Amino acid sequence: MIVSPAQLRKLSVRLLPFSDAASETLPLAALLRLSLFQVSVGMAGVMLLGTLNRVMIVEMSLAATLVAVMIALPVLIAPFRALLGFRSDTYRSAIGWKRIPYLWFGSLWQMGGLAVMPFALLVLEGNTVHHVPFAGEVLAALAFLMTGLGMHMTQTAGLALAADRASDETRPRVVALLYVMFLVGMGLSALLVGWLLTDYSPLRLIRVVQGAAVATLLLNLVALWRQERLRPMTACERASPRPRFAAAWQDLARGGEAGRLLVTVFLGTMAFTMQDVLLEPYGGEILGLSVSSTTLLTALWACGALAGFALAARRMSRRANPYRLAATGLIAGLVAFSAVIFAAPMASGSLFFVGSTLIGFGGGLFAVATLSAAMTMATGDLAGRGLALGAWGAAQATASGLAIALGGGLRDSVNALAATGQWGTAVATPATGYSFVYHTEIALIFATLIALGPLVRRRTQSWGPAASTPSRIGLADFPT
């Protein structure tokens, strides 16, 4: 049988991962281009949380407290994501664009923060001829704030644009694809930046960070190119009064789903991220694993997260209840943290690795399911998808930053109290602080399940039973 070139092209597209995410309103080529904004955000996240964090503490010998404050600054902007999303919903330009202006200016903020950051850090280190009090701290804080603002604006507008263009049937797969591209951006950037900074020098740091700034602008420019149609507006249309944020928020919160969803996202994100800075130290200090062994944790977590993304995309394409999927992720988290806790008394590295993989699976499934719920939420007349997605991002980012800080603080304080012997000799070990954090995360998971319960019933009543005809299973179901 002879296969025509058209049939061959159609077959090759169908074999691509996430090919089922394409639709008539959002073709596969446009979707893959649009997903590049997630690559740039992942790259900026690696620069802030990984590369620059290590450089400031080790090579520049800056105080860890000062570094922690600088890294926490972008989290302070996270609550404004709801306002940014609302503004992109109601923005009126002469040519009719709503999302692209915010995606573009977010790219400029992100690029500008990365562009000035190495010079600000060198001033903070003291590599200047004239010493100006607090100049380094102020400049570094501005650089981190600019980068954080750009990341939040870019991601909020980009997710809203993807939700606008995707169809109801393909939206779950679009969500999963965007999350995968975020992980791809983080992974590739970590490898590339780590290789470029093998021989560290201040000049090389400037080149690498500013190269990341240029790459951010190029990636986002390709991502936003021709993603919104031109809809010219008259001067009267642009001058008409816009809805107020307070009124739009009340419109979104009407019915109770939005507020409870934000509480659920906040609690669930805290439950899954409080251990982010503790998992590798736990494996090395308590289980005695080598550096190479604990390095595998990131890969195992990523594999678990990808499996969660694939399951969420496949189930929601069959009209599964996203809140039930979120509950499944939370239950997987209960098993995961229990395995991590019991790994210490059983001295089992294998149980620890299984728990780490399940943490990624449960966290990924929970994140994608709640994001899809925010994308498909009934927004009313005044509130749009940008407001809903911005509120989801605000809750998620704020909870993540708070949970990481609390996790480290709880471990240190509990270990300090346990070392005094006041609680008995049985718990006067370094494992006590870690175990307390993991038990706290289990308690947060139960609290999240309590908050999630009414949402499961409400969405089940509104959606009705799942589709009876299952869709085919193809390579697109596995984002590997």
Image: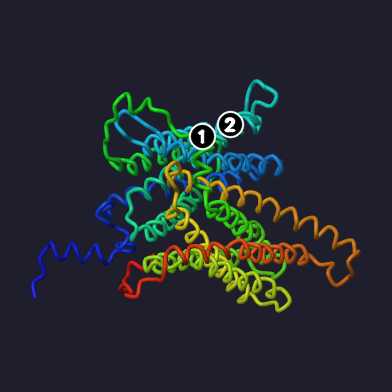
Residue 265 appears in view: yes
Identify residue for label 2: 142
- Callout 2: few (<14), some (14-19), or many (20+) C-alpha neighbours within 10 Å? some
Residue type at mark 1 is Gly
The quarter of the image holding the C terminus is bottom left
Depth check: give the residue in front, 371 or 69: 371
Identify residue for label 1: 113
The quarter of the image holding the N terminus is bottom left
- Asked whether, in this view, residue 317 is left or right of residue 2, the answer is right
Name the residue at the bottom extreme.
346
Depth check: give the residue in front, 458 or 427: 458
Q: Classify mark 1: helix, strand or loop.
A: helix
Tell me what residue is drawn at x 68 percent, y 74 percent. Answer: 343
Give the image location of residue 272, x and y in percent: 60, 61
Q: Quadrant of residue 281?
A: bottom right
Q: Quadrant of residue 52?
A: top right
Give the image location of residue 134, x and y in percent: 69, 27
Residue type at mark 2 is Leu
Give the image location of residue 158, x and y in percent: 41, 45
Tell me what residue is drawn at x 59 percent, y 57 percent. Answer: 264
| First reached walking from the N terminus: tag 2 or tag 1 | 1
Residue 46 appears in view: no
Q: Classify mark 2: helix, strand or loop.
A: helix
Give the image location of residue 349, x and y in percent: 63, 74
Q: Determine contact: label 2, label 1, CB under 8 Å.
A: yes
- Asked whether, in this view, residue 138 is left or right of residue 217, the answer is right
Name the residue at the left extreme.
2
Tell me what residue is drawn at x 55 percent, y 53 percent. Answer: 256
Q: Is residue 442 above or below residue 219?
A: below
Between the residue at mark 2 and the residue at mark 1, the CA separation in whole angstroms equals 8 Å
